[in-house]
Image (spheres, grey):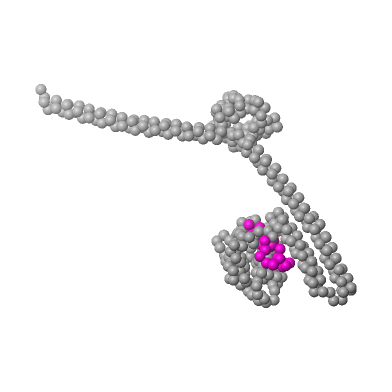
Amino acid sequence: MDLHSDFATININTIILVVSVSVFACFMWYFSTKLNTHLKGLESSKESQILFDMCLNAGKIGTWQYDIKHDILLWSQEMVDLFGIDVKNLQGFLDTVHPEDVERIKNACNKTIETHVKYAQNYRIVMPNGDIKMIAAKGEVYKDKFLGIASDITDLEASKLELIRKTEQLEDSNKELSKFAYVTSHDLKAPLRAVTNLIGWILEEVNVIVPEPSADLVKYIGLIKNRVKKMELLIDGILEYSRVGRCNIEKETLDLNQTVKEVVELVGKEGYTIHVDKLPSIWGNSVRVSQIFTNLINNAIQHHDKPTGNVWVKYEELPNFHKFCIVDDGPGIDPKYHKKIFEMFQTLGSKENTESTGIGLPIVKKILEHKGGSIDVLSELGKGASFCFKIPKKDKFIK
């Protein structure tokens, strides 16, 4: 016996066995890894499908698959629930579409099938019970399949129509209100003008009959004239307040240095010095912007408690706003009145003051807030007042 030969044979067999086992082990490891990955993929895919189905069901969204070659239409259960019927081909679907929409939808489907353009249509369907639904659908062609989704937008469309109706009603109401305000203003001013004329005639007659009328008579007649003048200012103020935000007014680039200069020339009063910072240019309506500065500067002078004083027009640029402050060294305003002064017909001045109507500040507040601005007052008794307002840095302001 050749022991050496037998030993070599054993070693070779052993090596072959070890290699075979190793290869088999590697194969099993590879197969196990791939199988595990595949199973995980299937599990993940199944989870995704479950989540997808849940989303479709929650959103009441139906899906369809149309086999173009064989004219076979497959609807999901959500689609069947949506239409109240199951159909098997394209014509069956078209039969559910409202007669006024069917031709448009047929053409849109054919166009997508022939040219592969994406499909997006809103249309009405007639339910088996005769009810009408509005459907929104989107789809596209993939290989030989026309795939898509559909949802019920009946309530949404009804809400849109209701919103349009309410908007139209509001516009009509605004027009009627504008007309009413104009007519009312005209009708109220006519008798006031008559009263003013009558007072003039009475004075002429009194001067003829009584060359030197008593001080009380002159006082009472003057009081009547002041009341009439205040009434006219009130009517003008109410009319102006009603117009804010409801009239289309032209806008332009405004140099506020020039605007404020014109305001100062208009409302300035002897004894009062108005100091103005360098101001920016903004995009807005000249009438509305002038109203803001006119009312605030005029208020600072009117309500001053001394024959002389100072008013400052200050400016500060903020990231998203232009900030202006109209500051005075007058008597100040008690903090408990800070909100009240922005309400209609509220005034802290004397009732005999014909120029104080209690409408100026509400108009300013309404103009500013209409387009995202704001106004605040900082003041204490005996320490003057500071009315600060912000104008947004955007081209929608001020109209």
Q: Which stretch is magenta?
A: 346-369
Q: Nearer the viewer, residue 177 or 72?
A: 177
Query: Does 353 lie within the magenta span?
Result: yes
Q: Which residue corresponds to the image point at 75% horizontal and 64% vertical from the top-left?
A: 230
Q: Nearer the viewer, residue 234 or 160?
A: 234
**Quadrant of the image for the N terminus?**
top left
Residue 322 drawn above or below residue 307: above
Residue 382 drawn above or below residue 322: below
The answer to whether any part of residue 315 appears in the image is no
Q: Nearer the viewer, residue 23 or 183?
A: 183
Q: Nearer the viewer, residue 240 or 94?
A: 240
Tell me where residue 381 appears, x and y as whole percent: 59, 69
Q: Which residue corresponds to the image point at 65% horizontal and 72% vertical from the top-left?
A: 305
Question: Residue 221: which quarter of the image?
Answer: bottom right
Residue 275 drawn above or below residue 236: below
**Quadrant of the image for the C terminus?**
bottom right
Q: Which residue corresponds to the image point at 58% horizontal and 61% vertical from the top-left?
A: 321
Q: Which residue corresponds to the image point at 41% horizontal and 33% vertical from the top-left?
A: 41
Is 142 on the left or on the right of 348, as rendered? left
Residue 328 drawn above or below residue 36: below
How many numbered markers are drawn? Answer: 0
Query: Does 241 lie within the magenta span?
Result: no
Tell me where residue 53 appears, x and y as whole percent: 50, 32
Tell me where residue 170 appears, x and y as whole percent: 71, 47
Question: Residue 337: which quarter of the image?
Answer: bottom right
